[in-house]
């Protein structure tokens, strides 16, 4: 089959040709935006799930929904140990620019607040030539979002930006990916600012995405966080939606799959969107003609697995130290007998013949790197589906 016409897209955060299985989430977000536009109370939304289930793709789709309504939008990705001032200021800058055509003077005033907020990320004693400068062509304001207290400053920033949107008859959507990597002080400030928006009825919505333990991260920062956010678990696709993700793009290219091929693909991918794209792409490339058969899938499987081993699994495994790899291998050995792959941390220690306290540094480092998460107290699980299977298939170091 023509590789140039191959419609499948196994890229990180890359929108697949058919966004299957997410219609309900998209419809719910449209309702949220409409309610906020009418001054109705609503909660911000946080998407949670394992790696490879399409959280970033869906987050981008939510942002596109806001753009179509003429709302101001901005997006950034949280990074471990990196304060949110600079990336959030850049996101707010973009959102304000999208609204600036309606009231240039007021927009410039708000941009001055955004700039003041951003500049507080630079220490005052830093030489002028070394200070970071945001690309905002207005003077920084004084006395607004520049106190140095992130909780005060973020609430003031959100209030002013949302006020600009309200005066333009629009709203603001702030998209934050990898929310679990926000620093504790920033998480607390974000919750406080969202609480302020809710109390004032201002049209600013946070749309976030992160690993399954994001609700616990937010709850640890502010006890009322569960009332601020609506958590939406993004999971693998059911059989019908997985078939739709494969067949719809193929049919648009005058191709199709046999029922047996779809059976084989669902067994291999278990409905995980990233795996569907990876296997779909390789099956298309090896198939001599349409329809793609189960035999084509069998031929394609080793190539798909090899590409996943390098780009999806291997790249993450390489980030781990020898002690962290030992911990993950023990999890993999134990994981087959536990629900959803979560294993007791005590069982990992027992498997390795070590005291649980001695393994805390490796476990904590893996948590920080986003390779594992705490499914519940005393439990640990991989953030990447099929990662245990991948580790069991590798030869020990």
Image (cartoon, helix red, strand yellow):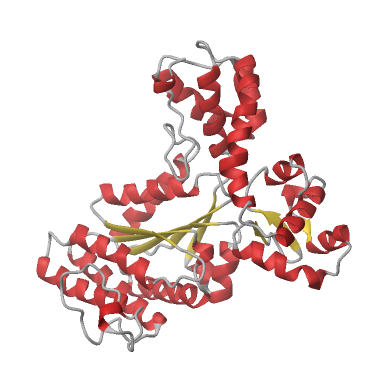
Residue placed at 81% from the left, 48% from the top?
333
User: Closer to the camera, 397 or 312?
Assistant: 397
The part of the image, by quadrant, that contains residue 312 is: top right
- Residue 223 is left or right of residue 162, and the answer is right
Where's residue 287, x and y in %? 54, 15
Where's residue 159, x and y in %? 29, 74
Q: Residue furthest top?
A: 289
User: In the picture shown, does residue 276 fall above or below 374?
Assistant: above
User: In the picture shown, does residue 24 fall above or below 180?
Assistant: above
The part of the image, by quadrant, that contains residue 86 is: bottom left
Whether residue 223 is visible, yes or no, is no
Residue placed at 60% from the left, 65% from the top?
368
The part of the image, by quadrant, that contains residue 258 is: top right
Whether residue 371 is visible, yes or no, is yes
User: Closer to the camera, 366 or 112?
Assistant: 366
- Residue 391 is left or right of residue 52, and the answer is right
Where's residue 265, x and y in %? 62, 26
- Residue 15 is left or right of residue 120, and the answer is right
User: In the picture shown, does residue 265 fall above or below 84?
Assistant: above
Where's residue 4, x and y in %? 39, 22
User: In the picture shown, does residue 367 fall above or below 305?
Assistant: below
Residue placed at 56% from the left, 62% from the top?
214
Q: How many marks?
A: 0
- Residue 270 is left or right of residue 184, and the answer is right
């Amino acid at each position: 089959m023509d590789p140039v016409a191959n419609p499948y897209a196994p890229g990180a955060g890359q929108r697949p040709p058919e966004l299957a299985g997410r219609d309900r989430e998209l419809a719910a977000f449209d309702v949220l935006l409409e309610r906020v536009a009418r001054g109705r109370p609503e909660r911000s939304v946080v998407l949670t799930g394992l790696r490879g289930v399409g959280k970033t793709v869906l987050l981008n789709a939510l942002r596109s929904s806001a753009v179509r309504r003429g709302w101001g939008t901005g997006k950034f990705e949280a990074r471990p140990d990196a304060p949110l001032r600079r990336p959030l200021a850049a996101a707010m800058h973009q959102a304000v620019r999208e609204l600036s055509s309606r009231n240039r003077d007021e927009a410039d005033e708000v941009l001055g607040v955004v700039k003041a907020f951003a500049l507080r990320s630079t220490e005052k004693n830093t030489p002028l030539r070394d200070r970071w400068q945001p690309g905002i062509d207005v003077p920084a304001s004084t006395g607004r979002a520049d106190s140095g207290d992130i909780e005060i400053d973020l609430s003031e920033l959100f209030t002013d930006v949302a006020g600009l949107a309200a005066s333009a008859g629009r709203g603001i959507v702030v998209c934050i990916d990898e929310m679990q990597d926000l620093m504790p002080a920033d998480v607390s400030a974000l919750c406080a600012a969202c609480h302020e928006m809710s109390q004032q009825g201002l049209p600013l919505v946070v749309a976030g995405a992160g690993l399954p333990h994001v609700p616990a991260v937010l709850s640890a920062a502010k006890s009322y966080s569960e009332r601020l956010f609506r958590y939406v678990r993004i999971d693998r696709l059911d059989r019908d939606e997985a078939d739709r993700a494969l067949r719809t793009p193929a049919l648009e290219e005058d191709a199709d799959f046999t029922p047996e091929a779809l059976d084989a693909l669902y067994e291999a991918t278990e409905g995980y969107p990233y795996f569907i794209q990876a296997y779909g792409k390789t099956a298309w490339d090896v198939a001599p003609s349409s329809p793609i058969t189960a035999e084509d899938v069998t031929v394609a499987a080793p190539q798909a697995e090899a590409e996943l081993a390098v780009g999806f699994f291997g790249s993450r495994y390489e980030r781990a130290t020898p002690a962290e790899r030992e911990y993950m291998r023990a999890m993999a050995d134990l994981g087959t007998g536990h629900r959803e792959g979560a294993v007791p941390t005590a069982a990992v220690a027992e498997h390795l013949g070590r005291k649980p306290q001695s393994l805390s540094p490796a476990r904590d480092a893996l948590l920080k790197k986003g390779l594992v998460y705490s499914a519940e107290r005393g439990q640990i699980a991989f953030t990447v589906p099929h990662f245990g299977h991948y580790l069991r298939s590798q030869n020990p170091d």
